[in-house]
Image (cartoon, rainbow, N blue to C red):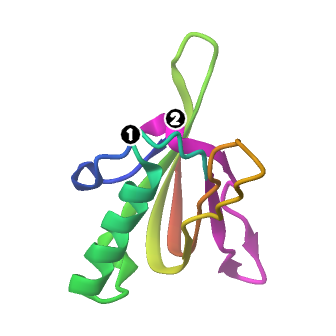
Amino acid sequence: MVQFPEKFKFTQWFVQKINKPKFTNSEWEDIRIDFHDPIKPSATQFLYEIVKFLKINGNDGKLLEIKIQSIDQTGAIVEEWLIIVDKILTINFGDLDYNDETPQKPFLILKPLNCHLNI
């Protein structure tokens, strides 16, 4: 499960794929989050709210924290990462293809300032 700050009205099942934190050469690597956009509710609207937030506050992602939670079959959290975001590198709202009826696939790429593991 992925959690964003409540102000963005994020629906957890928007996330199709996310890479967990990676630490390479003394730095946290970028994290990519791929979304599934079922139109209603709109993952595109959620991502646009992040754009509006960044336009008001600058690309100071330090104001954003997200959590990545791994859960077991009973729903208990077995691992939780707190990601303190340094900046948002890319927000891609997806492409439209009128020959394909699959939902849009927007994605977000962020640069972590720091990551904390809570077990």
Q: Residue at x 70, y 42 (%)?
A: 101
Residues marked 2 and 1 touching at CB (< 8 Å): no
Q: In the rendered structure, find residue 41 and report the number of the disc placed on it.
A: 1
Q: Amino acid at mark 2?
A: Trp
Of callouts 2 and 1, the N-terminal one: 2
Which picture quadrant has residue 62? bottom left
Instruction: Determine the CA span between mark 2 and mark 1.
Output: 10 Å
Q: Residue at x 47, y 43 (%)?
A: 39
The residue most toward the front is 98
How many discs mark residues in the rendered view? 2
The residue most toward the top is 74
Instruction: Answer whether residue 84 is visible to the viewer in this image.
Output: yes
Which picture quadrant has residue 19? bottom right
Task: Please determine whether, in this image, residue 15 is positioned above or below residue 58.
Answer: above
Left or right for 82, reference 16:
left
**Is 96 in front, or is 84?**
96
Q: Where is residue 81? Give x, y as percent.
A: 53, 50
Instruction: Answer whether residue 1 is visible to the viewer in this image.
Output: no
Give the secondary structure at mark 2. Answer: helix
Image quadrant holding the C terminus, namely: top right
Q: Which residue is mark 2?
A: 13
